[in-house]
Image (cartoon, rainbow, N blue to C red):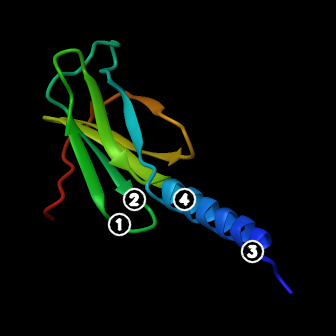
Amino acid sequence: MLNRKRIGILAAYLLLFCFLAVSAAAESYTLSGTVRDTAAHGVPSATVTAKSIATGKTYSAETNSDGAYAIRDLAGGDYEVSAVAGELEAPPIKVTLAAAQTTDLTVSPSPKPRGSSHFR
């Protein structure tokens, strides 16, 4: 039979477990980095997109005047990250965001092949 002291200890452990579970589930991460051209110059006003591989949801940010970007409040997991700046684009790169991690990413846009079109 459980006495009051043991019930109190079990209740305290249960509350601690619930608090830790909620804290872990609410954690979010930041994906940041710099978009650079092939000459290693920062690319301003590029659109960086992170697509969650698990959900298909996309998140985006625009680079500042130095080519830096940050996409905040992302859930942990795998993302496909790409960048577009006018006629330049960077192929997608797979990035994994994990616990207590901020991932810096540098992508190098390259020109689209001549004659290619998405509307054929």
Q: Residue at x 80, y 78 (%)?
A: 3
Compared to residue 77, the image places residue 109 above or below, namely above
Mark closest to the chain's N terminus, 3 or 1 = 3
Mark closest to the chain's N terminus, 3 or 4 = 3
Pointers 2 and 3 in contact (C-beta within 8 Å):
no
Compared to residue 30, the image places residue 68 above or below, namely above
- Indicate which disc residue 35 carries: none
Say which amino acid is labelled 3.
Answer: Arg
Q: Residue at x 39, y 68 (%)?
A: 55
State the residue in front, 95 or 115. Answer: 95
Pointers 2 and 4 in contact (C-beta within 8 Å):
no
Name, please, the residue furthest toward the right: 1
Q: Quadrant of residue 46?
A: top left
Gap between marks 2 and 3, in whole Å? 48 Å
Q: Which residue is mark 4?
A: 19
Q: Which residue is mark 2?
A: 52
Q: As drawn, is 45 to the left or to the right of 83? A: left
Pointers 1 and 2 in contact (C-beta within 8 Å):
yes
Say which amino acid is labelled 1.
Answer: Gly
- Indicate which disc residue 4 carries: 3
Gap between marks 2 and 4, in whole Å? 27 Å
Q: As drawn, is 86 to the left or to the right of 108? A: left
- Indicate which disc residue 56 carries: 1
Query: Where does the image place residue 62, in percent across and percent down from the top left?
Result: 18, 34
